[in-house]
């Protein structure tokens, strides 16, 4: 568990499904994430994801973002393999009512610190769409550097989009 002013990062619980579904069921959120994050987002979707995380043998890679005693978002790390094994991708979302308050930047910073100290990774990266301005800004405020723009690299909602590669290293 990671406690900071304004939020707690903690493991998922089965009882989080109602709050997660409430915050995740927002097209503005799903429009900025991979297609596997559904819209509408139901309690069944939340239950599936919670079970997926809890069944993982290494649960310390995924955290609920708890604000005011409620699961209001999530952040996770996906370690790469083979020659990329010192890398991990970071992904996150936060309920809209908490946007613009600096919370996600603080969450990213805390997660990066945790990952560098505990997971053996040396580089963490994120791949936000160029249209996800708030996420890019949060990454930059958390110390990430924009490494590249990948043109026409993804398709979301039947639109081909560019995306960025941001990273932070611990060498």
Image (cartoon, rainbow, N blue to C red):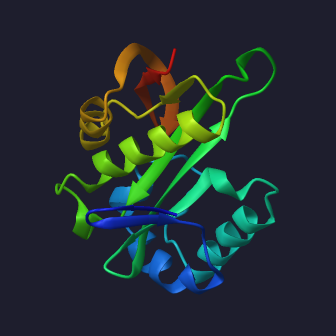
Q: Position of residue 93 (x, y in %)?
A: 42, 55
The residue located at (59%, 86%) in the rendering is: 15
Residue 152, image x, y percentages: 46, 20
Name the foreground residue: 18 vs 109: 109
Residue 81 position within the rendered picture, expressed as x and y whole percent measured from the top left? 78, 26
Q: Residue at x 24, y 35 (%)?
A: 137
Q: Give the vertical position of 72 relative to 59 (above or below).
A: below
Count of residue discs: 0
Which of 133/157 is in front? 133
Picture quadrant of residue 109? top left
Q: Residue at image x 55%, y 78%? A: 42
Question: Is 103 rendered above or below residue 72?
Answer: above
Is 159 placed left or right of 122 in the picture?
left
Q: Is residue 49 visible?
A: yes
In which image quadrant can residue 160 be found? top left
Rendered position, 164 above or below 142: above
Among the 4 quarters of the image, the one containing residue 30: bottom left
Place of residue 41 in the rendered image (x, y in percent of width and height, measured from the top left): 51, 72
60 to the left or right of 56:
left
In this rendering, does residue 32 appear at all? no
Q: In the orientation shown, which residue stands out farthest toward the front?
A: 117
Which residue lies at the image location 46% right of the left edge and 39% below the top edge? 113
């Amino acid at each position: 568990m990671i406690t900071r002013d304004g939020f707690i990062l903690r493991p998922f619980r089965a009882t989080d499904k109602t709050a997660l579904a409430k915050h995740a069921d927002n097209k503005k959120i799903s429009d900025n994430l991979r297609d596997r994050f559904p819209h509408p987002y139901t309690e069944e979707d939340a239950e599936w994801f919670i079970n997926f995380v809890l069944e993982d043998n290494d649960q310390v890679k995924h955290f609920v973002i708890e604000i005011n005693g409620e699961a209001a978002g999530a952040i996770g790390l996906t370690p790469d393999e083979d020659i990329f094994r010192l890398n991990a991708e970071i992904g996150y979302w936060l309920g809209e009512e908490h946007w613009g308050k600096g919370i996600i930047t603080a969450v990213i910073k805390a997660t990066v610190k945790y990952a560098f100290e505990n997971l053996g990774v040396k580089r963490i990266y994120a791949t936000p769409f160029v249209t996800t301005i708030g996420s890019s800004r949060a990454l930059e405020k958390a110390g990430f550097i924009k490494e590249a723009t990948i043109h026409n690299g993804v398709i979301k909602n039947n639109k081909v989009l560019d995306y960025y590669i941001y990273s932070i290293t611990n060498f």
